[in-house]
Image (tube, rainbow, N blue to C red):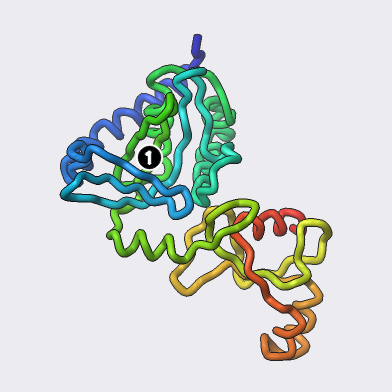
Amino acid sequence: MIFRPLKYEKYAQKAVDKLQESQPEFRTKFDTDNYDNWFYNQSSETLRLYNNDKEIYFKYIPVGTFSLNTNSWMWAWANEDSVEPRKFRTLKIKEFGEKKNYENLTKSHFCGDKYTGWELTAIVFDIIGGIGTYRVISEHLEKYFLLTEQITKEEAEKIESELIECSVHGKIRKAFICQHLNTKQKTGFEEAFETYRGMELGEEDDFQAWCSECEKERIKTDGWNEESMEFAKIKLVCERCYFEIKEINV
């Protein structure tokens, strides 16, 4: 039996009603019901719907998954197998749940029913916003998406081309760190700008960080120049490596 406190039940129904009001317009506008195939790319967080004669692309935020074998839900932020950077956007739902004491929004895993996935996706739609939602089913697993924008095929390919292959974490966004930063010891952590997991980056922006010693060299030379860059020996890493190092140092 699934227990839902009355306050949560009322809020969840309000969110579901909101999604049910807007979803038909989204489905009609993008003709999503008339595509027979789908493909999603975790690395680029893009969803492709296609037939033999047409296709459409969306950017998405992963919401979570529902297992039809165990009748259980898992939030995207708790899925360690996922490389999707924007899964951490759903931590906003967890924070909301903690403030309201809504257990379904704070527990990483819990038992549910055939309505659970859509209910929680409706809540994400209500809190984060988007243009619509989508669900795919494969091997007894339902995966729910919050769609944030339509993009072109060229834009999807550009996103994919800017990813790097990490031997530990797979294909994911790139980041840059000095030679001294690592996951074994604290060395200080200076950034080009404040960052958080899953954040959107501008076209000219990258995750960039360096250690305390490199910061001293940078200040001594009045900014980055050949001397300070030689000391730093900046190297390429993936986004997940970057934030693992940041967690150790900050």
What residue is rendered at 44% in x and 65% in y?
161
Q: Secondary structure at mark 1?
A: helix
The amino acid beneath tag 1 is Phe
Side (left or right) of 223 relative to 196: right
What residue is rendered at 76% in x and 62% in y?
182
Number of labelled discs?
1
What residue is rendered at 42% in x and 45% in y?
128
Is residue 25 visible in the rendered image? The answer is: no
What residue is rendered at 67% in x and 90% in y?
225
Side (left or right) of 194 relative to 245: left
Crowding at mark 1 (Cα within 10 Å: few <14, some 14-19, many 20+): many
Query: Where is residue 241, by image quadrant?
Result: bottom right
Where in the figure is residue 53, as x and y percent of width and height?
16, 49
203 above or below 129? below
3 above or below 158? above
The quadrant in which the C terminus is found is bottom right
119 above or below 26? above
Where in the figure is residue 205, as x and y percent of width and height?
51, 71
Side (left or right) of 205 relative to 19: right
160 above or below 87? below
The extreme front residue here reads 52
Residue that numbered label 1 is attached to: 125
Where in the figure is residue 139, as x and y percent of width and height?
43, 27
Is residue 15 visible in the rendered image? The answer is: yes
The extreme top residue here reads 1
